[in-house]
């Protein structure tokens, strides 16, 4: 786990006592694997799940209208938005560019109200260079995105993962394929606050609007 995450957990641990439940949740999500974070929490029944699916579909359509690469997974309950690394970073660089910040701007609203979503940042690379190099580059890049989000909003429910070249979309056998594999995936996983709104039948995309 990157040292940045350890620092984040230590800082979170200094929160006021009344936030003990949220603090425990934050610590837990940092300890979970990517797969476990993608699978939790789950709606408590089918009615809540249906409301989440309907809500997420509407959110996904809104993101697609902004020309973003959007998919739905986990029975259409989780949104994944994919950004080519070339839109975020210069070649072999780890500093998030101004263009990259503008590219990621549509995602900021999802962390303005901590507890609605868990945002998972997953950085990938191609297999150019050693395993150590690709992992370190993807780690530095995902930490750069994490730091920018920290400056922009709340990172209480944001978890970064660096996967290096371990999960390619396609074979790394051409320039174009390697470019496709260099990417940032952002997963929007409904968290407890959103599930509770769905349970009460009060789920509406207006909750994502910010001033």
Image (spheres, helix red, strand yellow):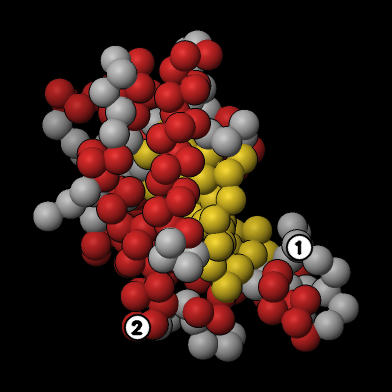
The residue that appears at 19% across and 36% down in the rendered structure is 15
Which residue corresponds to the image point at 35% horizontal and 52% vertical from the top-left?
7
Q: Where, by quadrant of the figure, is residue 171 drawn?
A: bottom right
x and y percent of residue 192 in the render?
36, 25
Question: Which x, y percent locates residue 168?
Answer: 76, 63
Give the numbered dot on residue 138: none
- Quadrant of the image containing the C terminus: bottom left
CA neighbours of label 1 inside 10 A, class few (<14), some (14 to 19), many (20+) = some
Q: Whole-percent x and y of residue 127?
A: 78, 73
Q: Is residue 146 above or below residue 132?
A: above
Q: Foreground: 24 or 48?
A: 48
Q: Is residue 180 visible?
A: yes
Secondary structure at badge 1 equals loop
Q: Quadrant of residue 170?
A: bottom right
Mark number, residue 98: 2
Residue drawn at point x = 65 percent, y = 72 percent: 182
71 to the left or right of 129: left
In the image, residue 75 sits, relative to residue 8, either above or below, namely above
Across and down, in percent, residue 185 comes to 56, 58
Say which label, 1 or 2, has the lower sequence index: 2
Q: Quadrant of residue 115?
A: top left
Label 2: element kind: helix
Residue 118 in view of the camera: no
Residue bearing the label numbered 1: 168
Q: Are the two marked residues, 1 and 2, in contact with CB atoms closer than 8 angstroms?
A: no
Q: Residue furthest top?
A: 45
How far apart marks 1 and 2 lie (CA) works out to 26 Å
């Amino acid at each position: 786990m990157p040292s940045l995450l350890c620092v984040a957990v230590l800082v979170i641990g200094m929160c006021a006592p009344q936030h003990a439940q949220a603090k425990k949740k934050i610590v837990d999500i940092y300890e979970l694997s990517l797969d476990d974070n993608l699978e939790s929490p789950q709606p408590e029944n089918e009615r809540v799940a249906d409301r989440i699916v309907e809500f997420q579909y509407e959110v996904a359509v809104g993101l697609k209208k902004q020309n973003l690469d959007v998919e739905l997974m986990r029975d259409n309950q989780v949104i994944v938005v994919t950004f080519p690394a070339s839109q975020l970073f210069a070649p072999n660089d780890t500093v998030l560019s101004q263009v990259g910040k503008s590219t990621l701007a549509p995602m900021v609203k999802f962390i303005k109200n901590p507890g609605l979503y868990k945002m998972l940042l997953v950085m990938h690379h191609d297999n150019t260079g050693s395993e150590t190099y690709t992992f370190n580059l993807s780690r530095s890049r995902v930490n750069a995105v994490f730091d920018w989000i920290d400056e922009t909003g709340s990172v209480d429910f944001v978890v970064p993962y660096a996967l290096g070249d371990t999960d390619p979309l396609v074979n790394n056998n051409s320039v174009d394929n390697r470019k496709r594999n260099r990417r940032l995936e952002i997963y929007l996983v409904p968290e407890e606050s959103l599930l509770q709104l769905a349970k009460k039948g009060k789920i509406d995309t207006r909750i994502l609007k910010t001033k």
